[in-house]
């Protein structure tokens, strides 16, 4: 095992790191800790150490001086820096010195896991790199840009990280381009992402990253709205590596908004535009502006009180919702100037909204419930048939909610598993987050899902591993890690328990 030494003048941070990380799963062993740089240096000179994790600001000797001094006797020593909020000059110096990553306190465990995994890969290859790797830079960009675009980072912290990572975003307006693959873990997506990163490398107005849904996102500043969008699409489509329209990756664009203050709106619009590939599967890309069909000669505002529909849906009021839809379609057909095409578009928009609302409530997508209804809406020959189609969708949404009336905390736990199954997850950790005793949370989870927390997460991880074994060329131990198993032997045991054969045998069935 590779040796790790932790240095922080706050003992509870070092102790927390030692307890929170399954070091053995990474092939690492913590061989010591210290509360100041001088003590750490004395012990590192006597103890073999491969990886140093150190705070910057400490008494007697700061973290940067510790790294410099320790490398005099151990030139291949790798280092990860822990930083307080207002130490940007130190961080820049750390970048010049050559570190694996810097982590802001409180520590993002996912970012630390990624950094440790990458450090171990370097140690295994016996090719220590004195510079911050491009892989780790991209991890930091993904984390920073996603937190910014979803409103989870302060302006001060974003500006600090952006300056460090070379993100300028100086143009007044911008747009989001979003690319989605049927399988977010596919090799084709990874290769496309690498091509996109290379294509925009060095650009001062476009930055690609991956969000928490597995989509590839490009934040792009624009000098000219229409020409800028066309140029952007022209650059992106050849990079996606798809065989033709409707196959592989799907590209959507949000609207143009002020870059630094309202770009989150473009992100939401690009997400919504993705839903319209159900309607236009033959399209290579969709602009959100094209989905705003209620503009111009026809009524400028969406003619349905969607908020009233949403409340009826949440209340599981099937009869009330069905009656409201029937009354609205009767009203719409009597409006002056309303065309059949307009009624079709209203129907499709409602189906898409029901789909997105159900997904937001249940935290799970159910595309099979809606794809057939889209076709039925476009094939309908009169308003009554359109009304029946939309009412059917609404009623099935209510039925789905009635059948899955889980408590909010269990839905949150399920979302956490589905989004972060590769991370360390425990009832104790989730109980603290959602302010509920872990024993009671475990009982509630089993009551509502029919499975224990451990059984559910193991089954889910194995399903993700099966997808990777079928679709990728990764080695089994790499797939185990991506599925959340850092101990390969335990992964083999769980896989055989749920699948009946070993991962190697399953991979050979392709």
Image: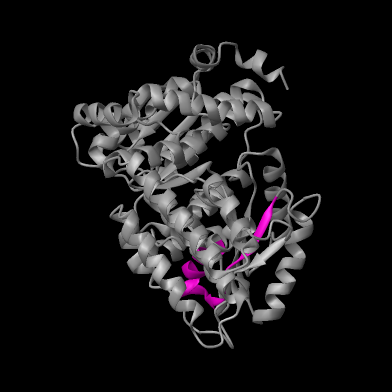
Figure coloring: one colour
Region rendered in magenta: 249-270
Answer whether residue 112 is magenta in the image: no
Number of marks in picture:
0
Residue 210 location in percent, x, y? 57, 51
Residue 377 location in percent, x, y? 59, 61
x 36%, y 23%: residue: 454
**Whether residue 251 is visible:** yes
Q: Quadrant of the C terminus?
A: top right
Depth check: give the residue in front, 457 or 54: 457
- In the shown orientation, is residue 294 left or right of residue 61? right
x 28%, y 55%: residue: 315
Depth check: give the residue in front, 117 or 226: 226
x 20%, y 26%: residue: 439
Depth check: give the residue in front, 494 or 5: 494
- Position of 58 relative to 262 (above/below): above
**Whether residue 123 is visible:** no
Residue 80 location in percent, x, y? 47, 40
- In the shown orientation, is residue 380 left or right of residue 309? right
- In the shown orientation, is residue 445 left or right of residue 158? left
Answer whether residue 261 is magenta in the image: yes
Depth check: give the residue in front, 19 or 263: 263
Q: Quadrant of residue 348?
A: bottom right
x 68%, y 80%: residue: 226
Residue 171 location in percent, x, y? 58, 77
């Amino acid at each position: 095992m590779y040796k790790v030494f932790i240095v922080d003048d706050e003992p509870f941070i070092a102790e927390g790191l030692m307890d929170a990380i399954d070091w053995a799963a990474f092939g690492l062993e913590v061989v010591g800790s210290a509360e100041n740089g001088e003590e750490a240096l004395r012990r590192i000179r006597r103890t073999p150490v491969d990886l140093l994790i150190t705070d910057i600001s400490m008494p007697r000797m700061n973290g940067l001086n510790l790294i410099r001094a320790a490398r005099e006797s151990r030139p291949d020593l790798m280092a990860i820096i822990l930083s307080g909020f207002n130490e940007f000059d130190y961080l820049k110096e750390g970048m010049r010195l050559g570190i694996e990553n810097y982590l802001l306190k409180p520590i993002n465990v996912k970012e630390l896991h990624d950094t440790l995994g990458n450090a171990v890969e370097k140690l295994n290859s016996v090719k220590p790199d004195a510079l911050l790797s491009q892989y780790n830079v991209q991890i930091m960009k993904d984390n920073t840009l996603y937190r910014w675009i979803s409103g989870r980072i302060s302006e001060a912290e974003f500006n600090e990280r952006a300056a460090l990572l070379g993100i300028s975003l100086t143009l007044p307006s911008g747009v989001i381009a979003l690319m989605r693959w049927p399988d977010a873990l596919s090799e084709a997506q990874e290769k496309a992402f690498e091509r996109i990163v290379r294509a925009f490398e060095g650009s001062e107005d476009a930055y690609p990253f991956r969000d928490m849904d597995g989509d590839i996102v490009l934040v792009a500043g624009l000098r000219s709205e229409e020409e800028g969008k066309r140029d952007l699409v022209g650059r992106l489509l050849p990079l996606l590596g798809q065989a033709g329209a409707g196959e592989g990756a799907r590209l959507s664009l949000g609207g143009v908004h002020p870059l630094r203050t309202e770009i989150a709106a473009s992100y939401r619009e690009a997400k919504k535009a993705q839903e319209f590939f159900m309607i236009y599967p033959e399209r290579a890309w969709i602009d959100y502006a094209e989905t705003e069909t209620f503009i111009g000669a026809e009524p400028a505002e969406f003619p349905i009180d969607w908020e009233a529909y949403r409340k009826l849906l949440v209340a599981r009021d099937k009869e009330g919702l069905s009656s409201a839809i029937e009354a609205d379609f009767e009203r719409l057909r009597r409006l002056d100037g309303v065309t059949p095409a307009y009624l079709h578009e209203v129907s499709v928009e409602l189906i898409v909204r029901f789909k997105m609302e159900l997904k937001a409530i249940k935290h799970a997508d159910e595309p099979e419930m809606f794809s057939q209804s889209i076709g039925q809406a476009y094939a309908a020959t009169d308003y009554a048939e359109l009304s029946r189609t939309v009412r059917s969708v609404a009623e099935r949404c209510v039925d789905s909610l009635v059948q899955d009336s889980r408590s909010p905390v269990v839905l949150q736990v399920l979302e956490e598993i589905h989004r972060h199954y590769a991370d360390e997850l425990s009832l104790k950790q989730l109980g603290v987050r959602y302010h509920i005793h872990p024993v009671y949370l475990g009982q509630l989870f089993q009551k509502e899902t029919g499975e224990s927390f451990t059984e559910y997460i193991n089954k889910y991880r194995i399903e993700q591993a099966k997808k990777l074994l079928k679709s990728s060329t990764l080695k089994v131990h790499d797939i185990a890690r991506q599925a959340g198993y850092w101990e390969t032997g335990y992964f083999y045991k769980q896989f055989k328990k749920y699948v009946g054969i070993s991962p190697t045998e399953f991979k050979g069935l392709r």
